[in-house]
Amino acid sequence: MMQSGGTGRETWGSKLGFVLAAAGSAIGLGNIWRFPYVLGENGGFAFLIAYLACVVLVGLPIMGAELAIGRGSGRNPVGAFKALLPGSLWWVVGGVGLLTGVLILSYYSVLAGWTVFYLTQSATGEIIFPTLAGDIVTALTFASTGLHIQFAQHMTESLFTGFVTNSPLVLLFHFIFMILCLLVVSQGVEKGIERYSKILMPTLLGLLFLLIIRSVTLPGSFDGLVFLFKPDFSKLSLDVILLAMGQAFYSLSLGMGVMITYGSYLDRKTNLFASGATVAGLDVGIALLAGVVIFPAVFAVGLEPSSGPGLTYIVLPAVFGKLPAGSLLATLFFLLLTIAAVTSAISLLEVMVSFATDEWKWKRRRATIIMAIVAFVIGVPSAMSFGDWSNATIFGLGFFDLADFLSANILLPVGGILIALFAGWAWGSEKVKAEIRDGNPELKLFPVWIWMVRILAPIAVLIVLMTNII
Ligand code: PHE
């Protein structure tokens, strides 16, 4: 174990372990479930350029700021601001980040629970060949028109609706997923989060490559790549730019303190800019590759890419049903999704746990159990929002969609602006410089970075937010 400063705080066992854990946090349902359809629907290559601009101009600088704040303080997000600027009110930024994290974990675990359910079902072939009584007539109608694949999709849609409206079952899988996260986080940073990330992230990569090869070798798959990447600059409205920015924050796990917390376990030899850039590069790369798995397969079987959850849980099962060895492919895909979800959700739980262990001096085990219960309970309305509580809406959105929208498009960007301003102005330029210098003695890119966190990133985020609110 690499020790930092003899504070007794846990540290990552190796640099690779940290990078894999941080990439594990970044690479999640956001990459595989959200990014591909947002990209396809909002102008393909044109959206990609807007997204990459957000990652480079806003995401990377804030990633550096969070890692520096974390390592510099050796604390959770609330304690970090308190330690670096005692007596100020900056800790509120960490507090809001913590609450944002709880909110994200609460609905993330619901969505991840669906994924675990689909994993259990795909292994048995259940989701791709659902047998639903009462659908015979529809079956005959579709069969007579030769629309077999549409029929398959009709069946997977019934299965999906049947599942998400079954609140007890959704709650059960929300619970099971939270237990999985609890088991990892309760074992600690090096022996839990890092150890599992080192096994799970390479597995995820392997699965992804297997699925890519299958997908792009299907006849007719090229149309999917066209859909994904065809540039349509007419779609680039301000709304779409907000979407790109929200996606960048969400996907890189920025703006609420995951990277502060993970940074707090770093040794002083790590180059913060270089490892932050590696994490961001892996994140963007895997999001693109996920698109390359999904769309070619969808087009190859002649289906339309739909948006949102429907793509993953309705269209893809129908696609798998059409392919040879479909249940094996479905199993691999939902395993990939489950792995991505676990390594992200544990980072959210770790933020809460590090807060309770640092600030309230709780033992890790106790902190993990209680925080997992809190996130589970807060997730209940999201779990029910597709079923029994589907009529309860705020601003026209159910709990689940509201939690998703609020966190990605408002809370994370606002948190990001404040984190950048703290690192750029409030903390003190000599102190930030000294922090970055450890592991990066020549301070490469520091002069560029400091102006990005001081001016460029906060203003860019503010403009995008304001133009959407007004
Ligand atoms: N980055 C994760 C994803 O893409 C989600 C996440 C957001 C995790 C914020 C932690 C913090 O799915």
Image: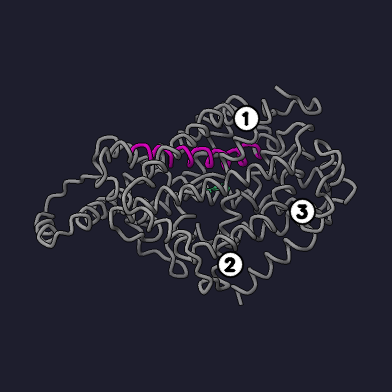
Foreground: disc 1 or disc 3: 1
Local SS, label 3: loop
- Give the residue type at disc 1: Val
10 Å neighbourhood of mark 2: few (<14), some, or many (≥20)? many
Coloring basis for residues? one colour
Please say whether residue 416 is visible from this viewpoint. no
The front one of 281 and 73 is 281
The front one of 116 and 291 is 291
- Give the residue type at disc 3: Trp
- Give the residue type at disc 2: Ile
The front one of 163 and 156 is 156
| Label located before the other in sequence (1 or 3) | 3
To which residue does mark 2 refer? 241
Local SS, label 2: helix
| The residue at label 2 has a CB less than 8 Å from ligand 1 | no
Q: How many marks?
A: 3
Q: Is residue 305 above or below residue 2?
A: below
Question: Where's residue 118, x and y in %?
Answer: 33, 42
To which residue does mark 3 refer? 90
- Which residue: 52% across, 28% down? 199
- Which residue: 70% across, 29% down? 11
- Mark sitting on residue 189: 1
Q: Is residue 443 left or right of residue 121?
A: right
Q: Split into 4 quadrants, where in the image is the N terminus?
A: top right
10 Å neighbourhood of mark 1: few (<14), some, or many (≥20)? many
Boundaries of the magenta span = 331-355
Q: Distance of mark 1 from mark 3, alpha carbons?
A: 26 Å
Question: Where's residue 299, x and y in %?
Answer: 33, 56
> Is residue 9 in the magenta section?
no
- Which residue: 67% across, 27% down? 14
Evaluate if marks 1 and 2 touch, with contact meaning CB atoms under 8 Å apart.
Answer: no
